[in-house]
Amino acid sequence: MTSTISASTALLTDHYELTMLQAALRSGAAHRRSVFEVFARRLPDGRRFGVVAGTGRFLEALKEFRFTEAEIDDLRRRAVVDEPTLEWLADYRFSGDIHGYAEGECYFPGSPLVVVESTFAEGVILETLILSILNHDSAVAAAASRMVLAADGRPCIEMGSRRTHEEAAVAAARAAYITGFAASSNLEAGRRYDVPTTGTSAHAFTLLHDDERAAFTAQVDSLGKDTTLLVDTYDVKNAVKIAVEVAGPELGGVRLDSGDLLVQAREVREQLDSLGATGTKIVVTSDLDEYAIAALAAGPVDAYGVGTSLVTGSGAPTAGMVYKLVQHAGDDGQMIDVAKKSKDKISVGGRKWALRRRNAQGVAEAEIIGIGEQPVDDGDDRALLVPLVRNGEVVAPTDAASARAVYERSRAELPAKARQMSRGEPVIPTRYEGPGMGGVTQR
Amino acid sequence: MTSTISASTALLTDHYELTMLQAALRSGAAHRRSVFEVFARRLPDGRRFGVVAGTGRFLEALKEFRFTEAEIDDLRRRAVVDEPTLEWLADYRFSGDIHGYAEGECYFPGSPLVVVESTFAEGVILETLILSILNHDSAVAAAASRMVLAADGRPCIEMGSRRTHEEAAVAAARAAYITGFAASSNLEAGRRYDVPTTGTSAHAFTLLHDDERAAFTAQVDSLGKDTTLLVDTYDVKNAVKIAVEVAGPELGGVRLDSGDLLVQAREVREQLDSLGATGTKIVVTSDLDEYAIAALAAGPVDAYGVGTSLVTGSGAPTAGMVYKLVQHAGDDGQMIDVAKKSKDKISVGGRKWALRRRNAQGVAEAEIIGIGEQPVDDGDDRALLVPLVRNGEVVAPTDAASARAVYERSRAELPAKARQMSRGEPVIPTRYEGPGMGGVTQR
């Protein structure tokens, strides 16, 4: 057992990918050209749209997907695969092409989010890494996007680190930032992804001091009058009074973390105004989700801190994306479309293209998916697949700021009902077009 | 932005912990002796017991909780805290004591799962790291324990990596192993935590070959007759026939990943037996949770593969544990019990002890929690707090195998109704005893 995290991402992989590799190397099929696609059969229950997040993290992880001596030794020790397979893995470096939706792009059922073109061997072993990252980050992004919409311009702050795996927390902060969150509490997200971080104090700080006045004085002395004081440790009304006495009317903000937030926010606003602290902001942070945020729209709230429901995808903690072989070369080198025959799961063989069809006003009308030759862009349709990896080299941006810009543009294109919090159908239908697919519509 | 994961865990921390530290260093309160406790106010809705998981991972992460030059530089660049605070952090090394429930122990509402004793400064900055790890791992362990109980002796295999963050996946495999899962698909969990790993092939392997017979032949050639063949890519009945033709009656197993599993398992069992493959096992793997596993008890199923519902805590993706200051020294050095005054949240000040009260047959009857002097063990009561860290040194085992043994013993002590899958009350009540707490019972 080792306690440190290896720099290699190669073992973030399911055992069966390597046994398939072993068997396919032996049968020779491993070297067949293949196309794998990532897609979601449906959006999480009731969601109006999905948001692709994690692509940039995947591309960075792909650079570290190498079977170094440490990984090979471990696979040998545990007899996971045979020596010819270990030899192949030791030389592994993804050398194929990957296209996909730009990170931050909105998506719909069936959207071909990532298209991996390589030999079977090179592509099959990426399944778990790519799905883990996209399923997690996209689930958080989908929830976060709804919270930002519900907040309707008021800033949202991500503070859910403590409610999820310590590394998932960093990725969640990044995903939330992509969909418009203003900041995160997570310091590692600040370092690693340039997400702005923020925070002032917890109840423990107040409890540590002899009384609330001593705590507030200590905080203002050190962090300045612009700080946010937590006012619900004992009695809110008394705390607000002390807070303004200590910091003066220049006090930056007060935070409420319990109780009936709408009622309290109104009372606190009135009290602050009566004390002359008309510029002091009210931050609320107690178990919020998109519905609670929407319910607080009528209140004098200046910012929302969101924790548990954000990092757990607000009821949908995984995005349900799958990674499927859709095409491979036969013995004659000709590409063959393939799909599992399943009554309960929709799978369409063949390499896909995808367009966002827009009306004359630029509003999205449909997700158009086809196989074969992609139609020429007529100006209203927007091609969705962009190059991510070419001959093994990452060619797309991987930073959160780029994805945030993509999201903002993509979301702005969606019909107005994308803002609805109620459960319902995807905001645009998915339509399959082109040879052999004409007319199939999925909602 | 950097793409690699730092070996230091120090920034897996919320911003406000460092601003509190800064303010408390300035006020002088930072050096007060303090006690912080981790507990859960309630179990996830309807669960009969919780399982502490992650303690070992936390202890390993604590060893790496250092603010090296890289962390200090980043905090300075982003102006998170002032120079005196950075100087203090550069020298930081936890030097206090930590007691807690042994990893794998069952727990109940209010159980003092981790008790951190140190200065305020040393303890306050551990909040996020400890909660992230315990909340995630314990949520998975609680779900996993129910699945193992539902499987009633048949092996469960963890295969949910693709449905959760890539590092959370490794931790989830470890948590599942602690509660009795037989194996995981996750290779990194095998390397890092010695969790047995397993896997054979996916639909992609079948689709890659020209037909099912070619795929099965390739797999058996390479992995042996003892392998498990996936038989639901096209037509199950035909696939089972081909599978036994290819491997003979010594075929290790067949896997079903779609459709009505109970009906199919019965049909496949009958078919296998009729072909003489009476020892061939049936593995089922399609969207299982504890209820689906229980429903399959009547079927001829030999093993369960569980994915999404395991890694997402089967409806409860976080354990809801909190980290609270319960005691600190005053100016005179005397320890003072503290708790936030909240109408809606139960918090009890003071350093706790905890006993599992057992009847003469050794069956657990109550979780007894108190403050002050811990009663002398009378033979039936079992003390639950064990030393984890002494003067900054980790003194408890941190491996998954030790936690698995603890869980097995602890679970065996619980009343029989702990096996019930239905929603209900915790299987034993939490009772507060001792000075000032007598008679309070929480269920």
Image (cartoon, coloured by chain):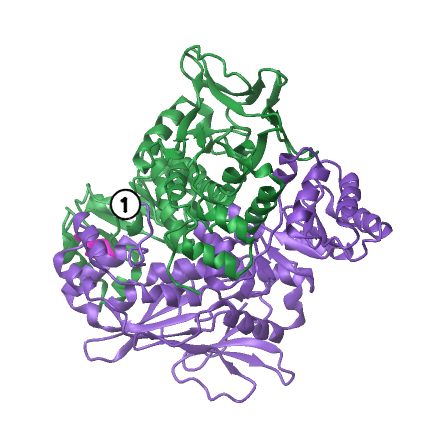
Chain colours: A purple, B green
Give the answer, above or below, for where A108 lies relative to A264.
below
Residue depicted at 55% across the width and 51% down the height: B15
Q: Which residue lies furthest to the right in this view?
A: A274
Q: Residue B361 or A365: which is nearer the viewer?
A: B361
Say few, some or many: other residues with alpha carbon within 10 Å of mark 1 (under 14 / 14 to 19 / 20 or more).
many
Q: Mark 1 lies on which chain?
A: B
Count of residue discs = 1
Residue B409 seen in the figure: yes
* Residue marked by disc 1: B282
Residue depicted at 52% across the width and 66% down the height: A51
Dividing the image into 4 quarters, which one contains the N terminus of chain B?
A: bottom left
Give the answer, above or below, for where A302 lies relative to A348.
above
Dividing the image into 4 quarters, which one contains the C terminus of chain B?
A: top right
Quadrant of res B341: top right
Give the answer, above or below, for where A384 lies relative to B344.
below
The secondary element bearing badge 1 is classed as strand
Q: Where is residue B13 in the image (x, y as percent from the top left)?
A: 50, 49
Residue depicted at 68% across the width and 35% down the height: B344
Q: What stretch is highlighted in magenta?
A: B239-244
Dominant secondary-structure state across the stretch colored magenta: helix
Q: Which amino acid does label 1 sit on?
A: Ile
Q: Residue B128 or B282: which is nearer the viewer?
A: B128
Quadrant of res A184: bottom right
Q: Where is residue B408 in the image (x, y as percent from the top left)?
A: 35, 28
Residue B41 seen in the figure: no
Q: Where is residue B80 in the image (x, y as percent from the top left)?
A: 55, 55
Q: Where is residue A37 in the image (x, y as percent from the top left)?
A: 37, 69
Is A238 left or right of B304, judged from the image as shown? right
Q: Residue A204 or A358: which is nearer the viewer?
A: A204
Q: Does the magenta stretch include residue A194?
A: no
